[in-house]
Image (cartoon, rainbow, N blue to C red):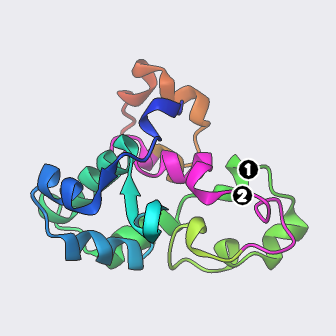
């Protein structure tokens, strides 16, 4: 599902701001609010990948077109059952702030003593899947990410 070539940090914050027609301050705000994890390059400068640019596009679409606030996006990310996608045992879930709280995506919490403790959140499947605006509702409904690759599944509709 992930494409390593899109994960290579290659853009400065100014370049990304220009690409997306957004202020540098907005990008920094999204980072502070936990919507975006960024790599740090030379001299501790933020660097962004193509995947980061797409994530920011998703954030901007949610804010500008769907009128979802930053806090709303954080709450949507909090609804993704990361523990299911990472096979986290129940004992560890009960101690994990991402499981107990519904404030933000799991990558915004400190992970100690669980399956995520040694993971790099920027490389985590849950973080990457959460950036896909078209598929996030399937994550929330806990549909297996492998089935998301099937275009027929993405267009199925159930009226209940």
Quick one: 75 or 44, which is closer to the camera? 44
Left or right: where 5 falls relative to 83: left
Q: Position of residue 69 (x, y in %)?
A: 25, 74
Label disc, if present, on residue 26 of the rendered structure:
none
Q: Position of residue 46 (x, y in %)?
A: 39, 64
Quick one: 57 or 50, which is closer to the camera? 50
Q: Main secondary structure of the magenta part?
A: loop
For the C terminus, give its image quadrant.
top left
Label disc, if present, on residue 83 of the rendered structure:
2
Residue found at x 20% / y 54%:
15
Quick one: 141 or 22, which is closer to the camera? 22
Residue 160 in view (yes/no)? no
Residue furthest left in the image: 21
Left or right: where 116 falls relative to 40: right
Compared to 19, does 34 lie above or below? below
Residue found at x 50% / y 47%:
128
Residue found at x 58% / y 36%:
145
Residue found at x 68% / y 47%:
85
Q: Position of residue 100 (x, y in %)?
A: 68, 79
Residue stretch in magenta: 111-137
Q: Is residue 92 magenta?
A: no
Residue 141 in view (yes/no)? yes
Label disc, if present, on residue 86 of the rendered structure:
1
> The residue tagged with tag 2: helix, strand or loop?
helix
Left or right: where 92 falls relative to 10: right
For the N terminus, give its image quadrant.
top right
> The residue tagged with tag 1: helix, strand or loop?
loop
Q: Residues within 10 Å of mark 2 (few under 14, many from 20)?
A: some
Q: Is residue 126 magenta?
A: yes
Compared to 124, does 118 lie above or below? below
């Amino acid at each position: 599902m992930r494409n390593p070539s899109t994960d290579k940090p290659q853009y400065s914050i100014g370049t990304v701001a220009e690409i997306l027609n957004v202020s540098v301050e907005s990008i920094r705000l999204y980072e502070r609010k936990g919507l975006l994890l960024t790599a740090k390059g030379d001299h501790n400068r933020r660097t962004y990948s193509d995947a980061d640019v797409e994530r920011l596009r998703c954030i901007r679409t949610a804010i500008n077109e769907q009128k979802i606030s930053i806090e709303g996006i954080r709450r949507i990310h909090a609804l993704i059952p990361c523990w299911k996608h990472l096979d986290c045992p129940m004992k560890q879930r009960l101690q994990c702030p991402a499981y107990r709280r519904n404030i933000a995506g799991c990558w915004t919490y400190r992970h100690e003593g669980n399956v995520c403790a040694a993971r790099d959140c920027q490389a985590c499947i849950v973080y990457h899947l959460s950036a896909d605006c078209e598929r996030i509702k399937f994550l929330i409904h806990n549909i297996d990410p492998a089935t998301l690759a099937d275009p027929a599944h993405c267009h199925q509709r159930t009226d209940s």
